[in-house]
Image (cartoon, rainbow, N blue to C red):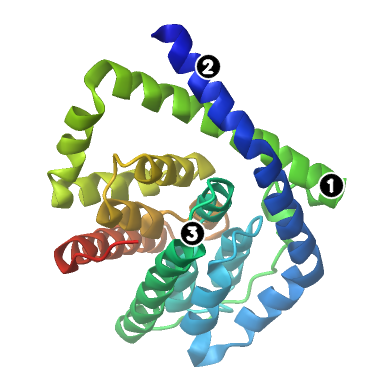
C-alpha cells in the first residue's frame, strides 16, 4: 500500500507539471505587462474601489494582494477595497484547477461567487468603517513580495511551478495516505456530513498566509473530501501573503486584526450560505 500511494501521488503530480508551467508563464507575462496598470486602476477607483479590487483580485498575480496591502497602509485605498481584494484573491486555486482540467464552467462559477461576495462585502465594510487618510511611501511590488520578478519571466514561472509542484506532491501524499488508511467514505462523511463545521475549519485553514492553504483546499475539494461551501469559506478567507505584508507595513495592529476577523467571518458566512442554498460547482 505504501509503494502504491507514493507512486500514484508522484504520477498524478508529475502530470500537472506542464500545465502548471504554462499557466504560470502566461500569468508572469501578464503581470510584467499589466501589473503597474492594475495597481494604478485600483488606486484611482475611488468609491468604486471594491468593484475594481474584486475583479482584479481574481487574477492570481504574484503579490497583487501584497500590493493592495501597501496601498491600504498608505490609505490610498479604503478598507473595503482591501477586503474585496483579499476575498477575491484565489492564490493557487486557479492554476490547480486549470492543471486538473476541470471544466471552464466550474472555474467561472467559483470565481463569480468569490467576486460577488467580495463586492458586496467591500461596500458593506466601507459603509461601516470610515476611511482614514495617511500618506505612506509605497514600495514597488517586487520589493514587498518575493515574486522573483528580477529573474525574468521564464525563471519566475519555473520557480513557481517547482514550488507548487512540491506542495501538490506533499499534499497528495498526505491525502492519499489518509484516504488509504481511514477510507474515503469515512473521511468524506466527517467533513461532508458536517457542512457548518467544515466551513468553520476551512475558514481557519484559509487564513494561513501561504499558498499551501489554497492548494490544500482546492485539492481536497477536487478529491471529493471537501464540500463546495467549505472550499468557498477557505478560499474567501485566504489572502495569501497579503496578510503577512499587511502586518509588516501597517503599524496599526488592532486594525490588522480587525481585517483578519472580517475575512474569517465573511468567508465562513458565505460558505455556510453556499451549503444552505445548495450551490454546486
Q: Residue at x 62, y 34 (%)?
A: 15
Residue at label 1?
154
Q: Quadrant of the C terminus?
A: bottom left
List x then y, in percent, for residue 129: 34, 80
List x then y, in percent, for residue 67: 63, 64
Numbered circle sitting on residue 103:
3
SS assignment at label 1:
helix
Q: Residue at x 25, y 58 (%)?
A: 268
List x then y, in percent, for residue 276: 14, 64
Whichever of labels 3 and 2 marks the residue nearer the N terminus, that label is 2
- 17 w.r.t. 206: above or below: above
Residue at label 2?
7
Residue at the limit of the structure toward the bottom, as seen here: 47
- Judged left or right of residue 104, residue 207 is left
Front residue of 277 and 159? 277
Q: Residue at x 80, y 51 (%)?
A: 149
Front residue of 168 and 98? 98
SS assignment at label 2:
helix
- Judged left or right of residue 175, residue 29 is right
SS assignment at label 3:
loop
- Judged left or right of residue 158, residue 219 is left
Q: Residue at x 31, y 56 (%)?
A: 233
Mark 1 neighbour class, 10 Å CA radius: few under 14, some 14 to 19, many 20 or more: some
CA gap, disc 3 and disc 1: 27 Å
CB under 8 Å between discs 3 and 2: no
- Judged left or right of residue 106, residue 27 is right
CA gap, disc 2 and disc 1: 29 Å
Whichever of labels 3 and 1 marks the residue nearer the N terminus, that label is 3
Amino acid at each position: 500500500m505504501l509503494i502504491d500511494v507514493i507512486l500514484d501521488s508522484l504520477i498524478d503530480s508529475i502530470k500537472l507539471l506542464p500545465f502548471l508551467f504554462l499557466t504560470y508563464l502566461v500569468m508572469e507575462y501578464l503581470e510584467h505587462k499589466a501589473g503597474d496598470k492594475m495597481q494604478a486602476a485600483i488606486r484611482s477607483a475611488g468609491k468604486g474601489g471594491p468593484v475594481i479590487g474584486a475583479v482584479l483580485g481574481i487574477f492570481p498575480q504574484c503579490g497583487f494582494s501584497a500590493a493592495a496591502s501597501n496601498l491600504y497602509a498608505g490609505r490610498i485605498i479604503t478598507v473595503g477595497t482591501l477586503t474585496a481584494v483579499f476575498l477575491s484573491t484565489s492564490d493557487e486555486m486557479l492554476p490547480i484547477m486549470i492543471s486538473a482540467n476541470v471544466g471552464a464552467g466550474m472555474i467561472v462559477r467559483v470565481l463569480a461567487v468569490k467576486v460577488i461576495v467580495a463586492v458586496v462585502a467591500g461596500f458593506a465594510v466601507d459603509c461601516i468603517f470610515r476611511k482614514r487618510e495617511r500618506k505612506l511611501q509605497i514600495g514597488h511590488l517586487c520589493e514587498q513580495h518575493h515574486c522573483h520578478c528580477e529573474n525574468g519571466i521564464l525563471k519566475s514561472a519555473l520557480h513557481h511551478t517547482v514550488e507548487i509542484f512540491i506542495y501538490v506532491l506533499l499534499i497528495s501524499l498526505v491525502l492519499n495516505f489518509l484516504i488509504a488508511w481511514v477510507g474515503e467514505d469515512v473521511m468524506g462523511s466527517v467533513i461532508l456530513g458536517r457542512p457548518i463545521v467544515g466551513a468553520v475549519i476551512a475558514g481557519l485553514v484559509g487564513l494561513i498566509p501561504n499558498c499551501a492553504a489554497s492548494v490544500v483546499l482546492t485539492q481536497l475539494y477536487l478529491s471529493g473530501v471537501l464540500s463546495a461551501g467549505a472550499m468557498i469559506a477557505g478560499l474567501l478567507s485566504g489572502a495569501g501573503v497579503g496578510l503577512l505584508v499587511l502586518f509588516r507595513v501597517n503599524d496599526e495592529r488592532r486594525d490588522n486584526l480587525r481585517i483578519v476577523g472580517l475575512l474569517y467571518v465573511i468567508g465562513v458566512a458565505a460558505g455556510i450560505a453556499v451549503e444552505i442554498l445548495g450551490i454546486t460547482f
